[in-house]
Image (spheres, rainbow, N blue to C red):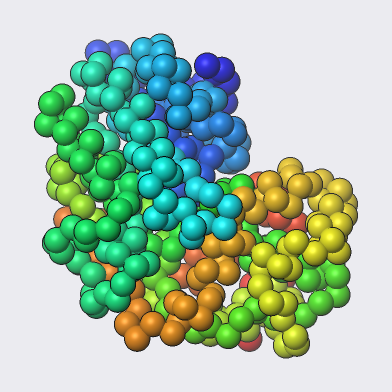
């Protein structure tokens, strides 16, 4: 176990027990946003568990523990060594290259289930946990294996397909009943965030595509012809909900869908995005994002950009993770050709007391700006650099 510190974790007032949140998968889209939200909320000690150190703004105070969640013995030792842990946000996930082939793979499903058991089990046994948040998503409704109804509600019976979501939920419920903590199950839709190297962050792929198109003198043309309807999730907005749930009785032992509150079609928004970035969207597009990034010219263009701009990551693959494959899935015809799109209801969450929302184009633009501020993308990918222009 290797622990590093970022500033000092604040001490609680005299006589108070400090709330200590552990964020597993802290380098991912949700984990990094959650880390920042808890660190900035005040009154929280924050411990980040992840193989890679999270890339977050410098004002976020946290401890980072480099952890392998597949190693049960190491997780047990880690849990025993931590100060009293009162809250857990579990945002870790194991994926395979290309993503989709692993979603129904029995071995990968079991690996993901074991990863949660490895950390939640020993933390729960200590008896200090008050609340746990776990993550699911649209696949909980089986939208990736069969047609679905509109809207999808949390009250629907569990969809009978193999998925690690059910392993996570069943174990969390069992541990909560045994050790007396509450939990919240979250089902966010398509995430917009600022984390690099993530499995599913379209912002990283869109930003890198914009930068390389500019560098290579290519049009900023959207690959494919899909008109897929998206419900998106701003990672920072979702992180606010995670903080809310940690403190709210209304979130105890509940399942919530989560979206920004609007609908979004990337193709319809593309011309506005191009205008905001000072790029021309007209012209011939590549066959896909993954194919474009694999081109030697794109790889060398990114290295040149990173060197010139002093970016954190000169390795394009390290920036993208699996996000370019995810974006190809989201823009594929197999999604837009569905007779019924996947649309979830968020009424339950609003009625429980969390009603914040954000326009999805505003979310996309602010996450591009966030990645620019973190020196993950060049300044030319910041819409504010172009005066926020729209068409």
**Above or below, 314 relative to 61:** below
Find residue 100 and report its horizontal and vertical position in percent: 48, 60
Q: Residue at x 25, y 16 (%)?
A: 126
- Residue 233 found in image quarter: bottom left
Find residue 187 and report its horizontal and vertical position in percent: 31, 56
- Tell which residue pokes out farthest to the front in this image: 106
Q: Is residue 263 visible?
A: yes
- Residue 104 found in image quarter: bottom left
Q: Which residue is drawn at 84% across and 61% down?
A: 296
- Residue 205 found in image quarter: bottom right
Q: Is residue 59 left or right of residue 39?
A: right
Q: Quadrant of the C terminus?
A: bottom right
Q: In this view, does 303 lie to the left or right of 134?
A: right
- In depth, the one of 137 and 203 nearer the eye is 137
Q: Which residue is drawn at 38% across and 82% down?
A: 338
Find residue 268 and report its horizontal and vertical position in percent: 53, 85
Q: Is residue 89 visible?
A: no
Find residue 279 and report its horizontal and vertical position in percent: 74, 78
**Above or below, 52 relative to 258:** above
Report the number of numbered marks: 0
Q: Which residue is drawn at 86% across and 48% down?
A: 307
């Amino acid at each position: 176990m290797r622990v590093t510190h970022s500033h000092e974790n604040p001490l609680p007032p005299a006589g108070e027990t400090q709330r200590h949140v552990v964020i597993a998968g802290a380098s991912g889209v949700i984990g990094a946003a959650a880390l920042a939200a808890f660190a900035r909320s005040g009154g929280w000690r924050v411990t980040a568990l992840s193989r890679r150190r999270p890339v977050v703004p410098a004002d976020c105070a946290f401890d980072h523990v480099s952890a392998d969640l597949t190693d049960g013995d190491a997780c047990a030792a880690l849990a025993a060594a931590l100060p009293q842990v009162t809250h857990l946000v579990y945002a870790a996930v194991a994926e395979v290259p290309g993503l989709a082939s692993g979603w129904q793979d029995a071995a990968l499903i079991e690996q993901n289930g074991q990863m949660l058991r490895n950390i939640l089990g020993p933390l729960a046994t200590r008896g200090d946990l008050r609340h746990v948040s776990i993550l699911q998503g649209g696949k909980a409704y089986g939208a990736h294996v069969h047609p679905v109804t509109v809207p999808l509600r949390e009250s629907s019976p569990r969809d009978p397909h193999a998925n690690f979501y059910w392993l996570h939920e069943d174990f969390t419920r069992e541990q909560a009943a045994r050790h007396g903590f509450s939990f919240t199950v979250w089902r966010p839709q398509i995430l917009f965030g600022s984390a690099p190297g993530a499995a599913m962050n379209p912002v990283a792929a869109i930003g890198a595509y914009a930068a390389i198109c500019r560098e290579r003198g290519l049009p900023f043309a959207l690959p494919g012809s899909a008109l897929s309807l998206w419900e998106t999730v701003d990672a920072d907005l979702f992180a606010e909900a995670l903080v809310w749930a940690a403190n709210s009785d209304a979130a105890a032992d509940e399942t919530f869908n989560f979206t920004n509150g609007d609908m979004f079609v990337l193709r319809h928004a593309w011309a506005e995005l191009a205008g905001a970035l000072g790029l021309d969207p007209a012209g011939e597009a590549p066959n896909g994002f993954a194919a474009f990034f694999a081109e030697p010219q794109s790889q060398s263009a990114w290295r040149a950009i990173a060197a010139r701009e002093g970016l954190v990551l000169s390795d394009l693959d390290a920036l993208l993770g699996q996000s370019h494959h995810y974006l190809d899935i989201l823009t594929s015809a197999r999604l837009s050709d569905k007779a019924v799109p996947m649309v979830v209801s968020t009424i339950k969450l609003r009625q429980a007391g969390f009603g914040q929302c954000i326009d999805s184009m505003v979310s996309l633009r602010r996450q591009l700006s966030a990645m620019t501020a973190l020196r993950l993308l060049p300044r030319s990918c910041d819409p504010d650099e172009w005066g926020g222009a729209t068409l």
